Image (cartoon, coloured by chain):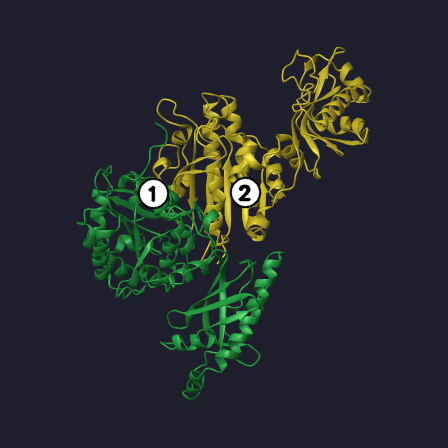
Chain colours: A yellow, B green
Amino acid sequence: MKEKAVLIVCDGLGDRQINGKTPLQMARKPNMDKLAEKGICGLMHTIAPGIIPGSDTGHLSIFGYDPNVYYKGRGVYEALGAGLELKRGDVAFRGNFATVDKELKVADRRAGRLKDEGKEFEKSLAGIKIDDVEVIFKSTTEHRGVLVFRGSGLSSKISDTDPHADGAKVLSSKPLEESREARKTSDILNRFTLLSHKLLSENHLNEAREKQGKPKANIILVRGAGSYKRVDSLYERYGFKSACISGGALYKGVAKAVGMDVIEVKGATGRTDTDVDAKARAAKDALEKYDLVFVHVKGMDNASHDGNLGDKVKMIEKVDRLVGGLMKSGAYLILTGDHSTPVSLREHSADPLPIVIYGKGVRVDDVKKFDEISCAKGGLGHIRGLDVMPIIVSFMGYAKKFGE
Amino acid sequence: MKEKAVLIVCDGLGDRQINGKTPLQMARKPNMDKLAEKGICGLMHTIAPGIIPGSDTGHLSIFGYDPNVYYKGRGVYEALGAGLELKRGDVAFRGNFATVDKELKVADRRAGRLKDEGKEFEKSLAGIKIDDVEVIFKSTTEHRGVLVFRGSGLSSKISDTDPHADGAKVLSSKPLEESREARKTSDILNRFTLLSHKLLSENHLNEAREKQGKPKANIILVRGAGSYKRVDSLYERYGFKSACISGGALYKGVAKAVGMDVIEVKGATGRTDTDVDAKARAAKDALEKYDLVFVHVKGMDNASHDGNLGDKVKMIEKVDRLVGGLMKSGAYLILTGDHSTPVSLREHSADPLPIVIYGKGVRVDDVKKFDEISCAKGGLGHIRGLDVMPIIVSFMGYAKKFGE
């Protein structure tokens, strides 16, 4: 008998105690607590104890892909998430429009945060070829975009051009290993950077922006080079169909990398203003066609990076509605996060995440609350991110016995 | 100071809650609970979280042999368990006498379940050689037996001839890898299959069976090819002598594969009617000569596969007597299972198993009951099957310090 499942991953969910309580302990979240009461709970080290996960490596782990083996650099997932189809050997970067002066000193890393002008600026960069390398730049949201190099003999072992700070000079990309491929790729990136400065400076929108006193979008800065290689998909591994519901491009990208279909949901913003009810409805609809539906919620992480405890608690309470909307779907419900982002730190930490599995046949333990402290005593014990998918798959009935 | 130990493995012991309780929670089992109260408890993932163990791979893990490295296919353990001595490179199969019609369509996969006639039918298959390959068939219980090919250049990467269903045609074995060895072995198996049909059809017992209206035992069907290779024994690893007490051939086979002696016990049937008192006595006697005695009890698994909750509970209560009979032996007592077989599923599952270690110096935790829920809170935490033997060995005093 095959079953379906919804995997809800709340970005940056885990936290530390503030005056004795974590945000999860402070929030009113009756549905999450009901999952804990009726389900089996535990703590999950997304990668391993003491290892601070990124959102990319964290999701890979939870999907069952050891990031030590499969992680190819952030750029790959951003590019896939932006809707680009990658080919083996492509090198992909996260990029953004920025403002530089004549000495290539960065005046504004975000070019005054573009609104919808990115699509227009993108046109200046269409059809570029440098030596035998095809260059693809795609604008995504605001000042952000992705850059892809397609050609033979490329390497992602090169450094960023983005200095990560206003006032600094644009960096010259350097090879990070002694190889012809890395030398070639950094050289092409440096030539592209200058070319982007030339071509964007000529874009008619910049003339208008100058008149309006807005910073020009006159260069592309990139970071997070990654090299694409296809991996065996969840379908190939287990034989079930899976889909992703997420507002953020990165999560769509990681999901696509492991073979999930991406379902676009109106109102899913990847921010605290996301429409959780729309996401819950979309997930329920997706269960008609898909066996595993991955729902990503980003808002807790944003609040944590801002050090905003109140917003984090509110976002948890908001996601509780999403959980409630899915409890009667008949599918297994798995609720966890990809990493902790303590409000007190404003950055990712290695603290493990609470996890609960709710559905037919799970060994119900006596945990009644879904939080970092209560779940530590649950029947799942302490597991790792890489354990999550095999456990889900075995409950869904797709696991093959090892031996006889 | 060296100590002795008895490792009791209850096949298919673990389960899920039915109306809030697992079979272990329903059973009256004062001795097991006493072990839990006076011992250290935990949960064991026989292979890894989410991985459904077979009985063969499960036992290998518990004996400390990673099945990812050491598992050689079921046939090997069945053949060893049937008392055959294997040589390196032998390919072994589980086999059974079956009834086929002239078109080799299977009328009865079990040839009407033979009683003691297997030994007589076996004679028709004695002394067969196909090309340079020696063929050994040994009848075991009822319609069951084992088949061994001995010769150079053989491979176990071939498919079964047993169609696993009545009414289907006997399968032609196919190579499962592109190798001369696999092609040769599948070819010899197909020729043996036809030869077994010819030779068994001529066996005088079949004439009598036909007159009595019984299905003829007129072919051998095989499955689970395995390739034998000797592994380092428990004695070679640790320096202690070990023995196996089990009714089932498979368990004797896995035990022999890791170098245990097999002690035959009258009344040990591998079924729910097994004589647990005889097994307890045999284990106590074995402790005179051996350092580690492995006792296997099969009945819970049979009841689980039949979906028979009552029998599973009764079998647990029966095994409780076995545990009671060994509590005063002075040896460490380790009680666990090889995999869960939830009555609700009627097949193996990935749910972890309760485990308890009872004996001198273990850190007694506050678990009072031996079951899946209580043991989750025990002092052993969550361990894996591969951890079990090192822990036992260290309590027994055979572990060597790593470093100084």
Q: Which residue is mark 2?
A: A294
- Tell me which corner region of the image, top left, top right, bottom left or bottom right, holds residue B10: bottom left
Amino acid at circle 1: Tyr
Left or right: B22 in relation to A207: left
User: Looking at the image, which is closer to me, B197 or B15?
Assistant: B197
Give the residue furthest to the bottom.
B211
Q: Position of residue A46 (x, y in %)?
A: 48, 34
Amino acid at circle 2: Phe
Q: Which residue is mark 1?
A: B238
Element under disc 2? strand
Indicate whether B325 appears above or below B104: above
Q: Is residue B43 at least partly visible in the picture? A: yes
Q: Which mark is residue B25?
A: none
Give the CA distance from mark 1 to mark 2: 47 Å
Quarter of the rendering occupied by the C terminus of chain A: bottom left
Left or right: B178 in relation to A304: right
Q: Is residue B29 at least partly visible in the picture? A: no
Q: Position of residue B116 (x, y in %)?
A: 36, 76
Mark 2 Cα-neighbour bin, 10 Å: few <14, some 14–19, many ≥20? many
Task: Please report, as a chain letter, where disc 1 is located.
Answer: B
Q: Residue at x 49, y 68 (%)?
A: B135
User: Looking at the image, which is closer to me, A164 or A314?
Assistant: A164
Left or right: A261 in relation to A328: right
Give the residue furthest to the left.
B328
Q: Position of residue B32 (x, y in %)?
A: 23, 50
Element under disc 1? helix
Indicate whether B293 appears above or below A377: below
User: Looking at the image, which is closer to me, B121 or A332?
Assistant: B121
Mark 1 Cα-neighbour bin, 10 Å: few <14, some 14–19, many ≥20? some
Dots 1, 2 in contact, CB < 8 A: no
Task: Please report, as a chain letter, where disc 2 is located.
Answer: A
Q: Position of residue A300 (x, y in %)?
A: 50, 30
